[in-house]
Image (cartoon, rainbow, N blue to C red):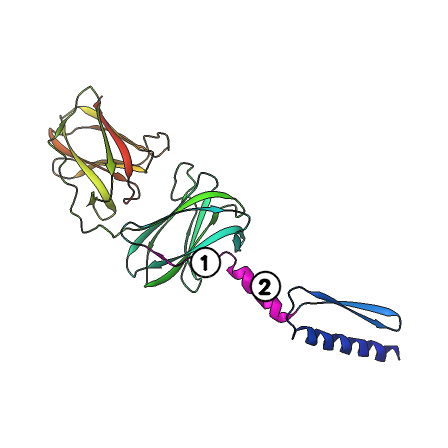
């Protein structure tokens, strides 16, 4: 007898669960069933509502803005990670940006922050992971993220901005640049007559901008200075900037690369360039002033002195 009653209670419970799945409810509900003085409680949530909640979680991190277009000037966005952001994998706070990329073009994607350790993911439209990075962008803290990417196909890609820890919050900047925009520019032109370098430091304040020509395949904005060096003498070259990651090249009179530097100068950001060079021959050398990324712009100071 008792077995039959319990089987009846179980059948009734299953019937009620089926009924609940056909109703439009937002939260789980509790169903109470009493059989021979025994109270049974069942927590029921509609499968339809559960699916809706799962989809909501999947989409929570997606940014609802329009798809970003990367033109000659690139994309530059100031944003923030906070407690309202959705999750991405084990990263509890993330933002997703949709960006349209062109097949075979080369792009640089930077996430910069002074508030946390930046982390970037790049996916295709089907959410297949294509690239990720932690600290390649260096930056003021040495913790900025950078992805260099050649698009395999036209389409919309997903940039996921988050932190290394996954739950960090704070301000960040997202930059997306078409590294091929400007390759049609000629190599940097002559900047006045050859500079004479002596014991008194020669100081030049200038700026890299969109109008500057390219140097090689990767440096889209560069300035060229001609410097007259004397065989056997030693010179120090410094490039400092708070706006960009400085990079210096030096070529001999035959345009052969004889020196280059990224961050040896330190400076306020830790990204200034510096090298010391002893001339192997008399003549006019070519000093190329650019940035580590190749397409960065901003003010800089160039200092040259004979040691």
Residue 107, numbered circle? none
Residue at position x 38%, y 43% in the image:
137
| Quadrant assignment for the C terminus | top left
Residue 53, numbered circle? 2
Query: Residue 246: which quarter of the image?
Result: top left
> Which tag is nearer the camera, tag 2 or tag 1?
1
In the rendered structure, the answer to whether residue 222 lies left or right of residue 45 reads left
In the rendered structure, the answer to whether residue 24 lies left or right of residue 129 reads right
Sooner in the amino-acid sequence: mark 2 or mark 1 = 2
Residue at position x 31%, y 50% in the image:
74
Whether label 2 touches label 1, CB < 8 Å: no
| Quadrant assignment for the N terminus | bottom right
**Residue 288 location (% of width, % of height):** 20, 37
The residue labelled by disc 1 is: 64
Report how many numbered discs are placed on residues in the image.
2
Q: Between residue 147 and residue 190, name the one nearer to us.
A: 190
**Residue 121 location (% of width, % of height):** 43, 53
> Magenta segment, which residues?
46-70
In the rendered view, would you say 231 is above or below 214? Answer: above
């Amino acid at each position: 007898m008792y077995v039959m009653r319990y089987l009846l209670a179980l059948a009734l419970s299953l019937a009620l669960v089926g009924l609940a799945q056909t109703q439009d409810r937002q939260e789980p509900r509790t169903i109470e069933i009493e059989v021979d003085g025994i109270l049974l409680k069942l927590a029921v949530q509609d499968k339809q509502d559960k699916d809706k909640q799962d989809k909501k979680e999947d989409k929570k991190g997606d940014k609802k803005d329009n798809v970003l277009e990367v033109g000659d000037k690139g994309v530059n966005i100031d944003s923030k990670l906070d407690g309202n952001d959705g999750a991405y994998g084990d990263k509890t706070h993330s933002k997703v940006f949709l960006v349209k990329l062109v097949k075979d073009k080369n792009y640089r994607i930077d996430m910069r922050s002074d508030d946390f350790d930046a982390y970037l993911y790049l996916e295709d439209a089907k959410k297949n992971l294509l690239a990720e990075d932690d600290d390649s962008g260096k930056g003021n803290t040495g913790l900025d993220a950078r992805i260099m990417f050649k698009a395999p196909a036209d389409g919309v890609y997903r940039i996921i901005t988050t932190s290394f820890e996954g739950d960090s919050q704070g301000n960040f900047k997202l930059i997306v640049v078409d590294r091929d925009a400007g390759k049609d520019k000629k190599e940097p032109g002559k900047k006045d007559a050859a500079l004479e370098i002596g014991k008194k430091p020669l100081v030049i304040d200038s700026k890299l901008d969109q109008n500057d020509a390219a140097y090689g395949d990767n440096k889209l904005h560069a300035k060229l200075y001609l410097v007259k060096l004397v065989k056997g003498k030693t010179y120090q070259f410094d490039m400092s900037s708070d706006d960009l990651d400085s990079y210096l090249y030096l070529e001999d009179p035959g345009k052969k690369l004889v020196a280059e530097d990224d961050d040896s100068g330190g400076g306020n950001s830790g990204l200034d360039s510096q090298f010391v060079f002893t001339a192997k021959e008399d003549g006019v050398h070519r000093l190329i002033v650019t940035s580590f990324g190749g397409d960065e712009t901003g003010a800089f100071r160039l200092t040259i002195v004979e040691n």
